[in-house]
Image: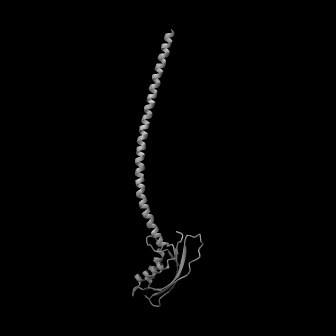
Amino acid sequence: MNDRHQLLVGLFVFILAIGLGVWQWNELQGLNETVVALQSEASNLRAFSSNLAEDYKEIKVEVTASRQETKQGLSQVLPESENLTELTRLFDDYAVKNNFESNPFFISAIQYSTPSSIEEASLYRSTTLDLSADSSKRNLSKFLEMIEASGSLEAGTRLMSVANLNISYPKEYGGTYGVRAKINAYYAPSL
């Protein structure tokens, strides 16, 4: 009986060892499948990362170009300094383009005053100019529209606002208007 017990215990241990071996084999196969799946996922992620890096390089070039274009446009709209020469040139060019015998726009004087004292923490400053001109009604409207559209990146015209406007009406129909305007031209030294 002792041999029989030993045989039964041996058979039980043998069956238990086979069962544990099959169970461990299945566990190992499952882990191997997980490793293969993770290696495949890592390969896919490396390819995705590479594609993202290439997309980033393309987007970075576009964004840099767009940023540069916007910075250039912004420097036209809000220059870093008063830049009175460019401001005078803007008004002179406008007068040359719009001064015709039948439709006049003639600037007789431009006088600049000292820059306004805006707090140091402010992002922008302004220069005030007094402009005297003789203009037809149509050119006066165009001039005011140009001032109104200033500051637009599309127009590329320096940001300005009319602080004061005095108009002398003509004595006869179709005559020229006498215009005196106080215009603020803005600039941003800190941008």
Q: How many marks?
A: 0
User: Which of the colour schemes (rainbow, by chain, secondary structure, one colour) is used?
Assistant: one colour
Compared to residue 46, the image places residue 77 above or below, namely below
- Please say whether residue 141 is visible from this viewpoint: no
Image coordinates of residue 169 in percent, x first then y, are: 49, 87
Kindly identify the residue that appears in the image at 50 percent across and 76 percent down.
160
Asked which quadrant contains residue 164, the reply is bottom right
Image coordinates of residue 15 in percent, x first then y, are: 46, 20
Image coordinates of residue 99 in percent, x first then y, are: 41, 84
Kindly identify the residue that appears in the image at 48 percent across and 18 percent down.
12
In depth, the one of 52 and 163 nearer the eye is: 52
Toward the right, the furthest residue is 119
Toward the bottom, the furthest residue is 171
Kindly identify the residue that appears in the image at 45 percent across and 80 percent down.
89
Kindly identify the residue that appears in the image at 42 percent across and 53 percent down.
53
- Please say whether residue 66 is visible from this viewpoint: yes
Image coordinates of residue 69 in percent, x first then y, are: 43, 67
